[in-house]
Amino acid sequence: MARFQRPRTVAEGVYQHLRRRLLAGELEPGRWLREQELAASLDVSRTPVREAVRQLAQEGLLVIEANRGVRVRGLTLEEAVATYEVRERLESMAAGLAARRVDAAARAALDEQLAAMNAVDPADQAEHVRADDAFHGLVARLSGNPVLQELVERLSERVMRVKVLTRDVNVSAFAREQHARIVAAIGAGDEAAAEAAMREHIRTNLRIVEERLAGAGPGAGGEEA
Amino acid sequence: MARFQRPRTVAEGVYQHLRRRLLAGELEPGRWLREQELAASLDVSRTPVREAVRQLAQEGLLVIEANRGVRVRGLTLEEAVATYEVRERLESMAAGLAARRVDAAARAALDEQLAAMNAVDPADQAEHVRADDAFHGLVARLSGNPVLQELVERLSERVMRVKVLTRDVNVSAFAREQHARIVAAIGAGDEAAAEAAMREHIRTNLRIVEERLAGAGPGAGGEEA
DNA sequence: GCATTGTATGTTGCATACAATCTTTCAGCA
DNA sequence: TGCTGAAAGATTGTATGCAACATACAATGC
């Protein structure tokens, strides 16, 4: 069928399609994906499918095994913890930089995003994950450091994956308060406070993820030899 | 001719070939690369060339322009500074973590790498860049955080590119002393000292890059609309 | 003279056919 | 019964042909 309107290229359409299904948790970890099958189901040839798959593999969502196929990548507890540890450093750095160079437009964007997050239907898990990701992406963008922004966005895919696999939506009033504190610190131009607020926020989330992953056992799985 | 021994796949061979030429500064920024021409010169088809080019583009070494071709990406001063700022955070984090979990094997590896760096022929610029990159990669690996390691390695390509384009080999005795200090701090298990030493080392390099890029004008260029 | 449109060209983007490689299975044999 | 090995099957990896797209330039109408 292949009805993607937005993307200019077929390969990009396939990429977005697969990425969406992966981040939604629709394709469970460990599952085999065959290029031929994907191509047939999307009514395109193997070539653009292959291109999309390679890109997703490089981003860490798929694992290519030589002459064997691609599998949906799982997440170990160690990997999730490692991701959050790096995230803590990068995003607190971004928050600090954003506070240093904040202006009226930045404040408006942050307030708007904050309002959008609070307006999300509490039952809509996927939408919450998306909104939270957009908030963190905005902070990264406001840092003014494009390299930092790129790395944060790259990690955000794994973060979304962690959230989906652990069902960590973190909709609590506590999370809202942390978000508000981050926005306030950045808006006030208080670099140290912004860094600290972001660090605390991510540490809180890490604790939640650790609890759920540890409680659920290996859970996500899919990383055998 | 296509004589690559190591890689198992042709696409990987093309990738390594192009990557090497790019990091060596052989392919100047702004230059157009045509798939057909590359394929013909390597005596392979366009398919693996295309795959390699896409990967290099995603890594930030090439820029794809729709239906027009790929260009070798240039580096602006802002981008170089942004890269080093992020690097400072990530690699100091890595040094600290490495110090926290250091053991005999790690000490041996660090000493060995340090000796290898000091043994490099001072005239061999490319070898110096490689050895320095290997040192930083080793520290990242010793951090024990695979996500951190991956990001550092990803940035290292741009770092090498910055070094080649600015001809920053930084062979000075000062740099050697900084490397030694980093190794000593990690070996002693002094987390704070290791972080500080790495931070200082990268800041020094940033200053050198800034001077050279600013002095040479836009220099590397190649980022027009 | 200027703007607009038509056309030529070079490049990527996609589809299909073929080759190489790995896994698995099953027959033969100790 | 367990083991070796070869052949078959399945999947990725590569090559090639064709179509679509973007740009540049010439032609035409205003």
Image: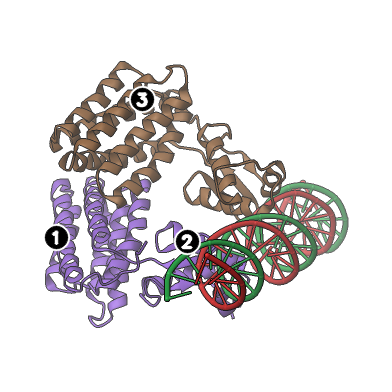
Chain colours: A purple, B brown, C red, D green
Examine the rendering and report whether any part of residue A2 can be seen: no
Circle 3 crowding by C-alpha within 10 Å: few under 14, some 14–19, many from 20:
some
Mark 3 residue type: Ala
Circle 1 crowding by C-alpha within 10 Å: few under 14, some 14–19, many from 20:
some
- Secondary structure at badge 3 equals helix
Q: How many marks?
A: 3
Mark 2 residue type: Ile
Alpha carbon distance from label 1 to label 2 = 42 Å
- Pointer 3: what residue? B116
Alpha carbon distance from label 2 to label 3 = 34 Å
- Secondary structure at badge 1 equals helix
For disc 2, the chain is: A
Circles 1 and 2, Cβ within 8 Å, touching? The answer is: no
- Pointer 2: what residue? A64
Alpha carbon distance from label 1 to label 3 = 49 Å
Image position, residue B90 (x, y; %): 27, 43
